[in-house]
Image (tube, grey):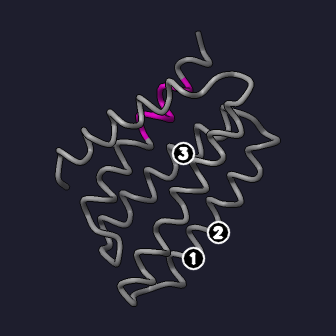
Amino acid sequence: MPVLPVIGGAIVGGAFAALVRRRQGPFLLAAILAAIAIVHPLFALVAGEDLLHQAVGAGAFLALAALGLRAGTTFLALAIVAHGGWDALLIATGGAVPEWYSASCIGFDLALGAVVLLRRRT
């Protein structure tokens, strides 16, 4: 896995974490989770590969985003971290999503989720 995209994604994820405030936090995190979920099927559609697999994954994360609006910031931060796991799985199995994108998404997801979770604990 390329390291530079992971680092770049982590920097951007940390910057996004600075935007998350208590009041708007759940809405912003749900919107981010929905947006990053939708990108994967778009890659598959453009490449003409495995759209069903990507659509199922996107549907699961869109459902988590919707549930998170009720469940709150901690739930959404954990769902974003879980999306990083999905990206790692995509790198391991190959497919339509470019490795650089999945690697940067892993960094983004882990940094954003971790910063939000750590801030909730303090």
116 is higher (above) or lower (below) than 53? above
Q: Are marks 2 and 1 in contact (CB under 8 Å)?
A: yes
In terms of image quadrants, where is residue 46?
bottom left
Residue drawn at the location 47% of the way across and 34% of the way down = 112
Task: Report which residue position mark 3 lands on.
Answer: 80
Q: Amino acid at mark 1?
A: Ala
Which numbered disc covers residue 104?
none
1 is higher (above) or lower (below) than 77? below
Q: Amino acid at mark 3?
A: Ile
The local secondary structure at tag 1 comes to helix
Task: Report which residue position mark 1 lands on.
Answer: 55
Q: Which residues are magenta?
A: 110-117
Q: Are marks 1 and 3 in contact (CB under 8 Å)?
A: no
The local secondary structure at tag 3 comes to helix
Q: Which corner quadrant holds the N terminus?
A: bottom left
User: In the visual, does 107 lie left or right of 83?
Assistant: left
Magenta residues, dominant SS class: helix
73 is higher (above) or lower (below) than 67? above
Q: Position of residue 87 (x, y in %)?
A: 40, 58
Residue reaching furthest to the bottom: 48
Q: Nearer the viewer, residue 53 or 18?
A: 18
Task: Report which residue position mark 2 lands on.
Answer: 59
